[in-house]
Structure formats: structure tokens, C-alpha cells
Amino acid sequence: VVFWINMMKAQKKNWAVYVPGGIPDDIDSVTADSPNQVTFHLNKSYSAKWFVYNELAQITPLPHAWDRTATGTSDCEHSVGDCTAVYNYLTDQAKSINSYATNPLWQVVDGPWRLKSFNADGNISFIPNTSYSGPNKPHLAQFNEAPFSDNAAEYNVLRSGDNSIQVGYLPPENAPAKPDDQAVGHNPLENNYTLDRWQSLSVNYFPLNSHNPKVGPIFQQQYFRQALASLVDQKSIIKAAVHGYGGTTNGPVPTTPKNPYASDKTEPNPFAYNPDRAGKLLADHGWSTPRDGVGTCERPGTGPNQCGPGVAAGTQLDFQLMYASGTQRVTLSMQQLQSSATKVGIKLNLRGAPFNTVIGTAIPCEAGKPDCNWEMGNWGGGWVFAPDFYPTGEQIFGTGAGSNVGSFSDPKLDELIAATQHSDSPEALQSYAQHGSQTVPVIWQPNVDYQETEIANNLKGVTPQNPYLNITPEDWYYVK
């Protein structure tokens, strides 16, 4: 644990969920009292719930064997000054993907499984770790992960009934319509598999790059974000694209699946689908809204009925929206938004790209830098609340946060986020949820199920499925 903390102190800028003021900044010192106990000395008092769920949950204890460089053992565990060299060495070793199953570094594990084989295509095999002394030892002799080129290829294997896949997924396009009063519809593979919904504790959205030198000033206007959000027909997308397997995203705190954090202050969705409202918001702030044309700023300025700071006269509502291709649900939702946007003078130029391209392009960036020219980016999944299990949003909406992809900044939202970190009161989280739903830091979209899982009828222990998208194959077992 101390090794991990010291590594974080040295390399916090490379931690994707680092938040200024969060871990490790909020830890003055840490002491290893014994092999099984450490003591943290914090810089101030924090909410116990928040600190346990969102700070301690980030820690992954690192093995002593990893405290080394190419020249031999190091001492990052005791000296932060040694950690950068260790980080660089481990990062370099991790780039050799084909050696994951053979490099002695990665054979040092303490969990129920160890890696047997791995390749870059996604074929991965695990076998039980015979040295594991903890609870929940594996029942299976081996656990394999198998990749497929697309949904159709995976579904064809499931449908063949050859039992080569014990846990798979039913593609959205093949899923039966879900009756409102039932968890799932009729399972087309019921002879061999049991169908189970896998819902994640998440919010789905796509960010707007507020630091883009051309269109960033538009994205910084709350009225524009509210208008664009009002053009996403979430309920229709859920019905048409995923046959009812999902719920709406109304704000920064999940409303589905059922959870203790959901806020009634975001119900109903304050910016549900309403093109008329979208058009009025734009017109009220100085934009022309020609149907099937491109709107322009006609009243520049900073007044309440003007386009806003940094938006010049004649600026057009013409944007580039890159989205993750290959998923019918995402493609359909982007086409719906593009069509609705034309009703109020917004032109969205869609460009499909591989998922990795989208997440590699849509990143937090500094204005004026070459990597800050992207405008809108939709990877299709928003954010699952892990390792920030308490959905207070500092990692995705806090100013300067590592996963605040659009570089959104709102002092009031920062203030409300901070309140959730210092109080266990439900009202603190409710106030944050309400303000976040009104200010629209990102464009909300349907929070669809992670997948509809097909589980072999003779395999047990797979359900209930974890809402943080973790799997525990050590709990799986066969029955006759």
C-alpha cells in the first residue's frame, strides 16, 4: 500500500482518475504499522463514506517484486524519489503485450487466478493460483476469454448450441423486446442458456471540448448545452435501438439500476427531448435557427439575450462529432441527434471511428495545443462508477480532473462536489445531482444495459452480476 501511495505521489499526473486535492494530495503521510496494517494521516477531516468508497478504493497494493528498475531492485516503497524510475521501467515492460504470460514480473500475483496465456487479439486464459490462500478458491480448472470480430459472429456461436461458450451476450439487435413489467423478454436461446440483464451503476454521456479554440466558447454557454441535450430522444432510442433494455440519464447521479443514491430532484429529466425548447433557448440567446440550415450568432455579446463571451457575430452552429463505430445502438442514437439538430439550425458532421481512436482523441487538453482541436467525442459508454463507487463526480466533472474529458469547469458544481466529500448527509449528494442536471456539463444519453448476458444452463454462480462490471469466475461452478 505504501509502495502504491509513493508511486502516486511521484506520478499522479499519469493516473487517469487523479483529481487535484484528492488522493494522494489529501494524505499528509502514511505509516506501515505492521505487515497487515497501515495508518493514513490526512490533511483535514473528510466524509468517511466518500474517503472509503472513492479514495481508498483506488488503491491497488503493489508487490515488492515490482519495486525495481532495469538495473535491479529499488526503494520506491520508502523513497518517493526512486519512484519515477520504477514507474518508467514497469511502463516499458507493460508495453510488451506478448510477454504478459511469460515475464516474471507479471507472474507475481496474490489472487485466485494466474495468467496462463495472453495475446493482443484478446485470447486470454487463466488457471487457478495454487498459492492462493484466501477465500473463494476457483471451482473451475481454467477460465478463458474469447474475442469476436462483431456481434453477429458471437451470436452465431451461441445459436449453434455447441457449448463452446458458457457465458456470452445477446446482441441488442437480437434481443427480444422487454415488457414493461418484466426483467427480460423471451430468450431465443432458452434451450441452452439463461438470459440475465447486466446493468451498471453508471451515467452515459458524451463531452464537448470547452477548450477548443473555435467552438469552445459556444460549448461554455449553459443554454447551448441545455439546447443540445433537449435534442437527444432518450426514450425513443431505448425502445428502438436496445428494445427497452436501459433507462434515461437525467444528471450526474445514476437513476438506473435502482440504487440508494438516485435523486428524485432529477426526475423527470429537466432536459428531456423537446426540439421546441432547444430552438427557443438558442433564439433567446441571439441565434438564428433555420430549419435544415445552419444557425448563426446574430446578437453577439455577454448580455442575457446574447450569444455569450467569446462568440463572435456570424459564428455558425456547425460542429464535428466523432463517435465509436461498430455498435448499432451508438450509430442510431447519433443519427437521431443529427436529424433532430437540423430542426433548430445545428449542423452535426458525424464521423464514425474505432473506439480506441475516439477515447484517444477526446481527452482533457490545453487550449492552443495540437491535441485540443477535437470538438465532440462519443465513445458510447459514459462513465461507470468504479473506482469512485460513491457517485460524487469529482473525477469526471471536477475542474482539472484527469477524466474530465471536456475540461468542463463550474465553480458552483465544484463547491457542491466538495460538500459531498466532507459530509455523509444525503442532502449534499442530492444538491450536487440537482445542480448537475441543470447545468448539463456533458450531453446525457441513454444509460443502456452493459449487456444481456447468456449463461449456460448448467453453469451457476454467475448471477447476480456486479453493477461495477467486475466478474468473479472463481465463484462459478457446473451442475449436472
Image: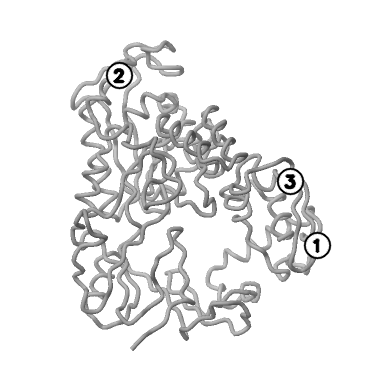
Q: CA distance from mark 2 to mark 1?
A: 64 Å
Image spot of residue 55 (x, y percent): 62, 50
Q: Secondary structure at mark 3?
A: strand
Q: Residues within 10 Å of mark 2 (few under 14, many from 20)?
A: many
Q: Quadrant of residue 145?
A: bottom left
Q: Secondary structure at mark 1?
A: strand
Q: Which residue is at the far bottom? A: 480
Residue on which the image places disc 3: 42
Does residue 371 show up? no
Q: Is residue 116 toward the left or the right of residue 267 in the image? A: right
Q: Residue at x 28, y 35 (%)?
A: 272
Q: Nearer the viewer, mark 2 or mark 1?
A: 1
Does residue 139 show up? yes
Image marks 2 and 1: residues in contact by CB distance under 8 Å: no
Q: Quadrant of residue 135?
A: bottom right
Residue on which the image places disc 1: 33
Relative to 299, residue 367 above or below: below
Query: Which corner quadrant holds the C terminus?
Result: bottom left
Image spot of residue 84 (x, y percent): 72, 54
Query: Which corner quadrant holds the N terminus?
Result: bottom right
Q: Earlier in the sequence, mark 3 or mark 1?
A: 1
Q: Nearer the viewer, residue 138 or 401?
A: 138
Look at label 1 and name its amino acid: Asp
Look at label 2 and name its amino acid: Thr
Relative to 456, residue 256 above or below: above
Q: Residue at x 43, y 78 (%)?
A: 476
Relative to 356, residue 264 above or below: above
Q: Residues within 10 Å of mark 1 (few under 14, many from 20)?
A: few
